[in-house]
Image (cartoon, coloured by chain):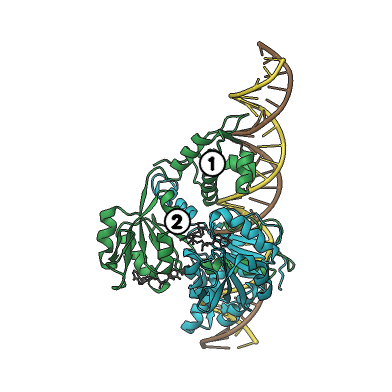
Chain colours: A cyan, B green, C brown, D yellow
Amino acid sequence: MSTFPRKISDSTVRRSSLYLRVLEALELEGSDTVSSRVLAERVGATAAQVRKDLSLFGTFGTRGLGYEVTALRERLAEILGLSHEWPVALVGAGRIGSALFEYPNFRERGFQIVAILDSDPRKVGQSWDGIEIHSTRELERTIERLGVEIALLAVPASVAQGVADHLVESGVRGILNFAPTRLRVPPGVAVNEVDLALELETLSFVLEGGGRDGNPAPEDVAAGPEGESR
Amino acid sequence: MSTFPRKISDSTVRRSSLYLRVLEALELEGSDTVSSRVLAERVGATAAQVRKDLSLFGTFGTRGLGYEVTALRERLAEILGLSHEWPVALVGAGRIGSALFEYPNFRERGFQIVAILDSDPRKVGQSWDGIEIHSTRELERTIERLGVEIALLAVPASVAQGVADHLVESGVRGILNFAPTRLRVPPGVAVNEVDLALELETLSFVLEGGGRDGNPAPEDVAAGPEGESR
DNA sequence: GTACCTTTGTGAAGGTTTTCACAAGCGAAG
DNA sequence: CTTCGCTTGTGAAAACCTTCACAAAGGTAC
Ligand SMILES: NC(=O)c1ccc[n+]([C@@H]2O[C@H](COP(=O)([O-])OP(=O)(O)OC[C@H]3O[C@@H](n4cnc5c(N)ncnc54)[C@H](O)[C@@H]3O)[C@@H](O)[C@H]2O)c1
Ligand SMILES: NC(=O)c1ccc[n+]([C@@H]2O[C@H](COP(=O)([O-])OP(=O)(O)OC[C@H]3O[C@@H](n4cnc5c(N)ncnc54)[C@H](O)[C@@H]3O)[C@@H](O)[C@H]2O)c1
């Protein structure tokens, strides 16, 4: 709904997600306000970075005081598109699919798995926690009926592109892809790849001395990916 | 083992991991050589980017011809630290832990789970596929005995930092963390965070119009995170 | 051997993200 | 009401990353 003057960078969005999590924790701890310094400390960034990030979204702080925890949390949640529930489809009811289904964190943050899809006739018809597993032949109908816009894609790599195409045709606009394949999707569709073998390989690169001189780089090693640009 | 003149950026390492995967596929397809253009096409980057990345590691190509597939694959694998097996410990034998354990992709790429650790007395003593689940009381001994340097951390967020500290004390230098907590580790230890709720939140941000004007940004939406630089 | 085609490797340019540094603003205290 | 201490918001600088553009060089055909 909301738009912003400048294009917001991926790194800013990712950090904002972390800020939100810290704000939720601070609220439970009973803090009323928080400074950019404290926020930064908690997420492993710099205070200037926090202020720059937040300033891209608007002006939230009070000079001399900091940010009001509850207000900022609410505003950030809204900005990140978390002020309403997202109905989510799980595609691929295999090993990783079942772990994802039972992951309570998704629902807590407003992502509710409302449909499970699989092509295996032995799985179709089963129910998980009251949600029936549908055949991928009913994919389009199911996605449309439930208004699903986000899908968790947990099918074998060999079929991932085909299933993704089908999802996009059916109206899905965001895919979290667990298969180790780069998906090609039309403009207007967002994909996030979760590539665990790649994550391990970046670890082994650093451990093997790629960072510098046989030792992992001292500084930025604690920060993680992203670089996650990430 | 190998060191490089300049510090290699995270994005370069991540792309290199993708190049390696494409090279493996090309080898199976029977290609002898590949140009930066083709390599780029397959991973969704530009040809110049591919050449820049590779040039940071050395000079591998032949002008007019391109890169020799097998030679480059071998060299890249070596650079990424994949020319030997890595014994890996799985810590937390829960839902995500068991999916990870059964994920064949890890072993195929040289990451072999040689130890499973859990604190739940009901799980300790069980065997998964011939590998016994050990108590976390034996963590240090197990890690040391098996020479584990990389751990998959799949325990509840509330205990993740404590377990991570214990792992580091025992000699672990690389952690792939699935708990939604930023780990603090001493210099010299590498951590990659896999934060699925965060990935979903970046999707919902884009879908909600954060990218631009109510529509996801047309260009870089297909590229994913790292971003994803991270 | 030469001409031509192709593709690499790489400085330089361009763009983006992070850090720096400080004026401006707010609240509290006296 | 003024002063003081603290913290934000933000231009400018620095660092970093990507793209451009082209000379250099290998292969091939004749
Ligand atoms: N197991 C893990 O820990 C793990 C980790 C990261 C990534 N992954 C990736 O996730 C994907 C699934 O892995 P898994 O271990 O759960 O495999 P799995 O074989 O246990 O599950 C795959 C599921 O997808 C279903 N499926 C197959 N073709 C389908 C189609 N065309 N449409 C719908 N459903 C279909 C299968 O019936 C099965 O239920 C793979 O791409 C894998 O590389 C797995
Ligand atoms: N289920 C998912 O799909 C999923 C996805 C992403 C991230 N995660 C994260 O992964 C972690 C594990 O999630 P899960 O769903 O597998 O939970 P789970 O409860 O199924 O498994 C957690 C396991 O950790 C063990 N454990 C608890 N304390 C321990 C300790 N101190 N030392 C060693 N082992 C200990 C438990 O006995 C249990 O076996 C959580 O942090 C969760 O947020 C889970």
Question: Residue A69, labelled with which disc?
Answer: none
Secondary element type, mark 1: helix
Q: Position of residue C21 (x, y in %)?
A: 58, 61
The picture quadrant for ligand 2 comes to bottom left
Quarter-of-image position of residue B131:
bottom left
- Label 2: few (<14), some (14–19) or many (≥20) C-alpha neighbours in 10 Å: many
Question: Residue A221, labelled with which disc?
Answer: 2
Left/right placement of residue A126 relative to residue B40 reads: left
Secondary element type, mark 2: loop
Q: Name which residue type carries label 1.
A: Leu
Q: Position of residue A212 (x, y in %)?
A: 43, 46
Q: Residue at x 54, y 65 (%)?
A: A121
Q: Residue at x 48, y 59 (%)?
A: A224
Question: Residue B23, labelled with which disc?
Answer: 1
> Does mark 1 fall on the same chain as mark 2?
no
In this orientation, does residue A139 appear? Answer: yes
Quarter-of-image position of residue B226:
bottom right
Check the image and report above or below for B42 versus B94.
Answer: above
Camera-side residue: A127 or A33? A127
Q: Name which residue type carries label 2.
A: Val
- Residue farthest along the front direction in this orientation: A121
Q: Position of residue B227 (x, y in %)?
A: 58, 57
